[in-house]
Each structure stands twice: as C-alpha cells, then as structure tokens.
Amino acid sequence: MTSRQYFRILMLAASIFLAYEFEALAQDQYPTRPVEVIVPYGPGGPNDLGVRFLSGKWAEVLGQAVVVVNKDGAAGGLGAKYVANAKPDGYTLLATSDSAVVWSRLGRKDTTYDLDSYRFLFNFGKSPIFFSVKSDSRWKTLHDFIKEAKNNPGKLKYASVGPASVYNMVADMMCEAAGGIKLTDVPFKSSPASLTALAGGT
C-alpha cells in the first residue's frame, strides 16, 4: 500500500472505542463504578482536551465519574494496546485519532491489536493537520521551505508524535508531492511538547 492509499482509509477524527467483546448491559446495571477513558497521547493535545471538555457531561449522563488517563508512547500504540488487552466490560475506553488504531498498526510489525480488537462507539471531533514554523522563521511560505529542503536533503527537521504516526504519513506525502525531498523527523511525546520546542527555537 502507498501512503496515499493509507491516507484514504484514515478516519481523520477523534473517536471513542472500547474492547470489541463488550456486551451492552441494561441501563440500570451499567455503569456501577467509574469509567476510565484512555488517551494514548500526552496531555494538552486535541484528543486530550476534547475528552476532558466532554468528560464532565458524560459523567452526568452515566451517573459515575469519568476518569481521563494519558498513556502516551509509540504514536498512540501503547494506549491502544492497553485498551485492546483490557477486560471487555465497558469500563476502559479509548479516545484516539486514527493514528493509534490504523496508521501506527499498519506502520509496525510488532503490534498485537487491530481494528477488530475494538468496537467503535462515536466520533466527537475532527482536527486539521497543519504545517507551521516559528513566526520569525526565514521561511515565509511552504514554497520557501521546500526549495531549501531540496538544496539540503535531510538537514531540515519537522516534529511529530513519533514514528508510524499520521504526522509522519502526512509529511511523507508532502515530501513525495514536492518531488521527493527528504526531511528529518524529530519525535515528541505530544503535539503541545513539539509546539513548545518550535516556539523555543529548538
């Protein structure tokens, strides 16, 4: 599969999943204890903020606390694996983008889960993927950046949330569309961490 084909199957949405075998319980039986929502990325990113914004309302409806837990690493793969291996009783949910359940799995051979490991519940948001530079950067347009990248293969860097993430895929697609330029990926645990590094000039 090419990166373009991968891109076409991605949901590009923040979604809620739970372990596939979960059987719906009668409303008066579930939940009887707090529900844990795993965010497979670091604090402060779009998935994390979206879930924390909504968790209070979910708790009101469910009548139980909704606990948001960050389990970041491996482009969302660690949190996704944790939920895939959790007891399928509806008390451990996964709030993720397509990176963790589609792209990171396709990009790795050592994952022990796939889409059939989960039951999809609903989308709660969509996030754009954008390319940005520091405000005082010498690059004023994407054309400026690509031109320099062509003249300096591999010397220009971009931030991502780790190998096999949707950010790597989009960067690869951009490089391909720009005629095969080469960039160096610098992985971070979360998008807020990468933006902080960018703003600091590191």
Image (tube, rainbow, N blue to C red):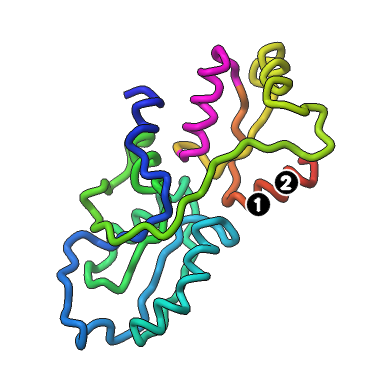
Say if 59 sits above or below 171 in the image: below
Q: Main secondary structure of the magenta part?
A: helix
Callout 1 crowding tier (Cα within 10 Å): few <14, some 14–19, many ≥20: some
Q: Which residue is mark 2?
A: 197
Q: Which residue is mark 1?
A: 193
The residue sitting at 72% across, 26% down in the picture is 141
Residue 28 drawn at (x, y percent):
20, 88
Q: CA distance from mark 2 to mark 1?
A: 6 Å
Residue 34 drawn at (x, y percent):
36, 82
Looking at the rendered structure, the kind of residue marked 1 is Ala
Q: Are marks 2 and 1 in contact (CB under 8 Å)?
A: yes
Secondary structure under the numbered disc 1 in the rendered image? helix
The magenta stretch is 165-182
The residue sitting at 59% across, 32% down in the picture is 185
| 181 is within the stretch colored magenta | yes
Q: Nearer the viewer, residue 47 or 185?
A: 47
Looking at the rendered structure, the kind of residue marked 2 is Ala
Q: Nearer the viewer, residue 62 or 159?
A: 62
Q: Quadrant of the C terminus?
A: top right
Q: Quadrant of the N terminus?
A: top left
Say if 89 sits above or below 153 in the image: below
